[in-house]
Image (cartoon, helix red, strand yellow):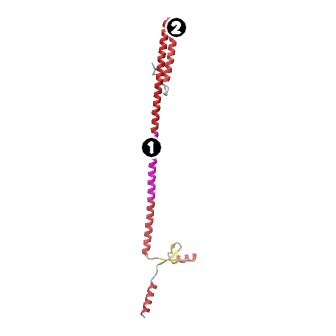
Amino acid sequence: MKILFFLFFLFSITGCTSKESVYWCGDHACINKKEKEDYFKKTMIVEIRETKGKLKKKNSELEKIILQSQKKDKKRVKIEKNLSKQVQMEEKRKRKEEKIKAKLALKEEKQKIKQAKLNQKRMEKEEKKLQKNIKREEKNVKKNKKKMIKKGSNEEFIVENNNIISSSFSTIVKKVKDKNFFKPYPDINDIPN
């Protein structure tokens, strides 16, 4: 009898304990019996899931919140990394552009210096040529004057002197043009001797 009493007591205890179970209506837990019955009428299916206590629910909700915050942190970290990479790439691009600009500026300066030297050499050569031409003209004028004096006629001297003056004026004009060839406007006041 003791065994029977013990078995009866054991069955009553286990039978009276309630399993924590929840009815599921599709993808969420049913709120009340009415919702459960409506869902059953529509689909002819009702799922029963056991829950292992309220602590599990609280922990699972906390875990969900933690996971969401971790995902947000991961996304934020990825975005920050991408932004920092973009900033670094932009800085590298700017440095490259500055280097290229500096190289181009150096090349331009070198070209300007070379061009200036070439222009200076040309000007020196032209000045030498002009000085030689001036000396030749002066020698020719002196020779012509000596010839005129030897001839002794004043009229011829005056006519040839006018020709010499007009030819010397045209040579001066030519010299001024040649000397100021590379300038945008010739310096008219700078008359070569």
Q: Position of residue 3 (x, y in %)?
A: 43, 92
Q: Position of residue 50 (x, y in %)?
A: 48, 77
Q: Position of residue 30 (x, y in %)?
A: 51, 75
Q: Are marks 2 and 1 in contact (CB under 8 Å)?
A: no
Q: Amino acid at mark 1?
A: Lys
Residue 82 versus residue 159 in the image, above or below:
below
Residue in front for this viewpoint, 111 or 57: 111
Residue 21 versus residue 145 in the image, above or below:
below
Q: What label sits on residue 192 in the rendered view?
A: none
Query: Which residue is under mark 2?
Result: 156
Magenta residue span: 77-104
Left-right relation of 41 to 102 = right
Magenta: main secondary structure equals helix
Label 2 CA crowd tier, 10 Å (few <14, some 14–19, many 20+): few
Q: Is residue 114 magenta?
A: no
Q: From mark 2 to mark 1, how far is it between C-alphas?
A: 74 Å
Query: Which residue is under mark 1?
Result: 99
Q: Position of residue 118 (x, y in %)?
A: 47, 30
Q: Residue at coordinates 45% horizontally, 49% vertically from top-left? A: 90
Q: Quadrant of residue 39?
A: bottom right
Q: Quadrant of the N terminus?
A: bottom left
Q: Is residue 100 magenta?
A: yes
Residue furthest to the top in view is 152
Could you say whether the residue bearing mark 1 is in a helix, strand or loop?
Answer: helix
Q: Amino acid at mark 2?
A: Glu
